[in-house]
Image (spheres, grey):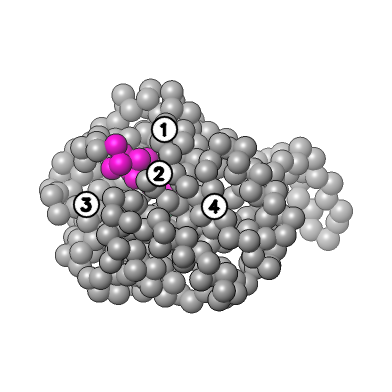
Amino acid sequence: MIITVTLNPALDKSARVNMVRPNALNRLHDITQDAGGKGINVSAMIRSLGGESIALGFSGGSTGEELQSLVAKKGLQYDFVHIAGVTRTNLKIMSDDRLLTEFNEPGPTILSCEWHELEQKLLGHGTRGNTIVLSGSLPLGLGKDTYKKISVILRKAGAAVFLDTDGEALKQAIDSGPEGIPDYIKPNRYELLRYFGVASDGIVAETKLVELCHTLIGRGIKLVALSLGRVGAIFVSKKGVWRSAGISVPVRSTVGAGDSMTGALVYGFEQGLGEEQCFALATAASAGASATEGNNPPLRTLVDSLLTQTRIEKIG
Ligand SMILES: Nc1ncnc2c1ncn2[C@@H]1O[C@H](COP(=O)(O)OP(=O)(O)OP(=O)(O)O)[C@@H](O)[C@H]1O
Ligand SMILES: [Mg+2]
């Protein structure tokens, strides 16, 4: 079974406005709500491909209720810990000239008893053969070593850990040594370079990126899926290096493209697909997500048609 974890989910409220005017009243229209959160996106991708997962996380207040009903509407299995705080609302405003303005709340502070409850749920699922996907930023109240600590426990119990986060939380997990290092990671270019303290504003040769990924493999990570936006991705494992060319699609929203890549990878692993098949599926799914409105996953039919356009090359 695949378990996804979203520690700081949000009720995403999207609206349209003619144009965003500061210091003035902006009248919103076409207001819609969706469940926001990277783990939830991963679960939605898995479902779209025909798989199953359970989405874990925190939810509180009336926005938390709304979040859960939206997750249920997506047809996802979920098991949230109810918290005293209130699930955040993130506002995304699209103007007629297609410029997106976002207002994100920090989200509630998680109490130690609430974290303990979630940890117990995770331990219940963290058995051999299960994959736990830890995605996104950490909420207030939880230390930057949270993913590291949970990764140590889950890996000891025999579960596989897929971590998709950034900054200090990623650094602490990777630097935790053999017992806590995640099995799989999916950094984008910026996240990988940030971890190594390399400036990300200039050109970095592909050979350098591969070298950095190899360093991580040397520390015990089984697969680094380095996503490169529309250019595609590089996959590095002990067995080799693969380049997957980006697929040209009419882009509607790249929000959650990385989560779709993660979802397709874990689904592929669970189905027992070969490495190259997993990488092709991940590339097709994430390109499909880019061609799909909002943070919705692409339909399986779209993924299947894009699969015919994937080009995976073993380069090392
Ligand atoms: N414009 C695009 N056209 C085609 N495919 C895309 C495009 N943008 C992203 N993708 C696909 O999605 C994958 C993940 O994208 P990206 O590298 O932007 O992830 P990310 O920065 O982690 O995104 P997220 O916001 O979900 O965290 C890419 O490797 C690629 O396969
Ligand atoms: Mg990402």
Secondary structure under tag 2 reads helix
The amino acid pointed to by label 4 is: Asp
Along the horizontal axis of the image, is 292 left or right of 183?
A: right
Label 3 crowd bin: few (<14), some (14–19), many (20+), radius 10 Å? many
Which mark is first along the chain, 4 or 1? 1
Do callouts 3 and 2 mark residues in contact (Cβ within 8 Å)?
no
Specify the segment rendered in magenta: 258-271
| Residue in view at x 25 percent, y 74 percent | 177
Which mark is first along the chain, 2 or 3? 3
Do callouts 1 and 2 mark residues in contact (Cβ within 8 Å)?
yes
Is residue 218 found inside the magenta-colored segment of the image? no
Q: Could you say which is closer to the camera, residue 78 or residue 36? A: 78
**Front of the two marks 1 and 4:** 4
Q: Position of residue 31 (x, y in %)?
A: 75, 41
Secondary structure under tag 1 reads helix
Q: In the rendered view, would you say 76 is above or below 184?
A: above
Say which mark, if any, is on residue 263: 2
Do callouts 1 and 4 mark residues in contact (Cβ within 8 Å)?
no
Q: Could you say which is closer to the camera, residue 248 or residue 89? A: 89
Which mark is first along the chain, 1 or 3? 1
The amino acid pointed to by label 1 is: Leu
Residue at numbered disc 4: 79
Give the CA distance from mark 3 to mark 1: 24 Å
Give the CA distance from mark 3 to mark 4: 33 Å
Say which mark, if any, is on residue 236: 3
Give the CA distance from mark 2 to mark 4: 18 Å
Asked if residue 51 shows in the view, the reply is yes
Label 4 crowd bin: few (<14), some (14–19), many (20+), radius 10 Å? some
Label 2 crowd bin: few (<14), some (14–19), many (20+), radius 10 Å? many
Residue at numbered disc 1: 49
Q: Position of residue 261 (x, y in %)?
A: 39, 44
